[in-house]
Image (cartoon, rainbow, N blue to C red):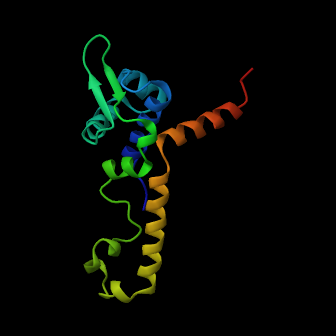
Amino acid sequence: MALNVTTDYAIRILLFLSANAPLGVSVTGKIIAEDMRIPYNYFLKIVPHLKRAGFIESFQGKNGGFALVRQPEDITLYDVIAAMDDDLVVSECLHNPAACGRNASSHCAVHNVFSDIQTNLDKHLKSVTLDQLQHNQQLIDDLKPVDG
């Protein structure tokens, strides 16, 4: 179980907008991609998913770019992961009992442990917002030594 790079980049894009642009204010894709170290062509493949999920909007023209359309405190890591990944699941048997070769999902100690882990993982991801992540990043950045 691991997040794919596309999901990682999606989180970075949303964090950039959360930290650098008030709601509805657009920033060019090139600036976002460069600052977040995302290949621009890859960036362009991710933004349609973020638009479909209702996180961002794109604007054309001289002042065009991308902007958040939901408040950062209203977007959780769970929301982003769910929009970008098919499944973030500890074990396939949690969503598909037929995946168990023993047909034991209903009476399996391992299944029960995986179910508890999944519940806690989902709960934690739903409790972490972009706003919190951006604030935590700012605290980390503030602790970095200044190059001199």
Residue 139 locus on image (x, y percent):
65, 36
Residue at 30% in and 84% down: 101
> Which part of the image, by quadrant, shows the N terminus?
bottom left
Location of residue 48 (image quadrant)? top left
Location of residue 93 (image quadrant)? bottom left
Location of residue 45 (image quadrant)? top left
Residue at 40% in and 27% down: 23
Tell which of 112 and 34 is nearer to you.
Answer: 112
- The outermost residue toward the top is 62
Residue at 54% in and 42% down: 132
Tell which of 16 and 100 is nearer to you.
Answer: 16
Tell which of 76 and 47 is nearer to you.
Answer: 76
* Residue 79 sits above or below residue 48 on the image: below
* Residue 6 sits above or below residue 110 on the image: above
* Residue 118 sits above or below residue 87 on the image: below
Relative to residue 43, is residue 72 drawn left or right? right
> Which part of the image, by quadrant, shows the C terminus?
top right
Relative to residue 25, is residue 57 drawn left or right? left
Residue 108 locus on image (x, y percent):
40, 87
Residue 98 locus on image (x, y percent):
25, 80
Count of marks, rendered view: 0
Relative to residue 147, is residue 120 drawn left or right? left
Residue 74 locus on image (x, y percent):
41, 42
